[in-house]
Image (tube, grey):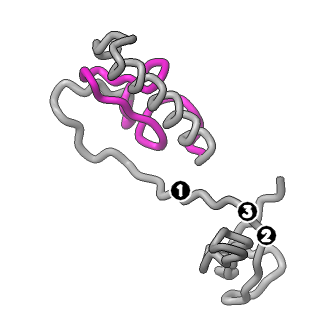
Amino acid sequence: VRIITGAAPVRILGGEAGAASAVEFAYTGEGTEGGTAGELFSLPADQVFKAIGQRLEQAPGGLRLDGTKIAVTGPGRTSLEMVWAGGDCATGGNDLTVTAVAQGRDAAEDIDRVLAGKGARLAAE
């Protein structure tokens, strides 16, 4: 994995049938490694994930926090019944898109079990 700093995504380039084929970036000039501000380059891609990074500013009553994040257990269960959380706003993981996707998958599987009557509806302890 190569990490490129000082660059921001500009657009997703499409290939056959509208699928992603590359992402175009522009150097920002901040910590740029080999490009000048505004210079464009592209990297091939067949999948693109959007990571927006959010912070919880206010929590509803009864929602347990761990510092500035929502406290969750196992598949993302919160202290509120029938409420799950994952990604940047939840404890665990390391603020990576791939972690948030995995947490979403785990929560979806748990939600499916609960809605199918195969799991407890109880909130996390």
Q: Secondary structure at mark 1?
A: loop
Q: Is residue 38 above or below residue 93?
A: below
> Which quarter of the figure has residue 119?
top left
Residue 77 colored in magenta in the image: yes
Amino acid on which the number 1 mark rests in the picture: Ala
> Which quarter of the figure has residue 47?
bottom right
In three-dimensional space, the C-alpha distance between marks 2 and 1, rounded to whole angstroms, equals 18 Å
* Residue 31 in sight from this viewpoint: no
Dot 1: within a 10 Å radius of its alpha carbon, few (fewer than 14), some, or many (20 or more) residues?
few
Foreground disc of the pair 2, 1: 2
In three-dimensional space, the C-alpha distance between marks 2 and 3, rounded to whole angstroms, equals 7 Å
Q: Is residue 68 above or below residue 55?
A: above
From the image, which quarter does the C terminus lie in?
top left
Residue 78 colored in magenta in the image: yes
Q: Secondary structure at mark 2?
A: strand
**Sequence order check: which comes first, mark 3 or mark 1?**
3
**Label annotation for residue 44:** 2
Q: Is residue 97 left or right of residue 90?
A: right
Dot 2: within a 10 Å radius of its alpha carbon, few (fewer than 14), some, or many (20 or more) residues?
few
**Label annotation for residue 51:** 1
**Label annotation for residue 46:** 3
Seen as rendered, the residue at the extreme left is 61
The segment highlighted magenta reads 67-96
**Sequence order check: which comes first, mark 2 or mark 1?**
2
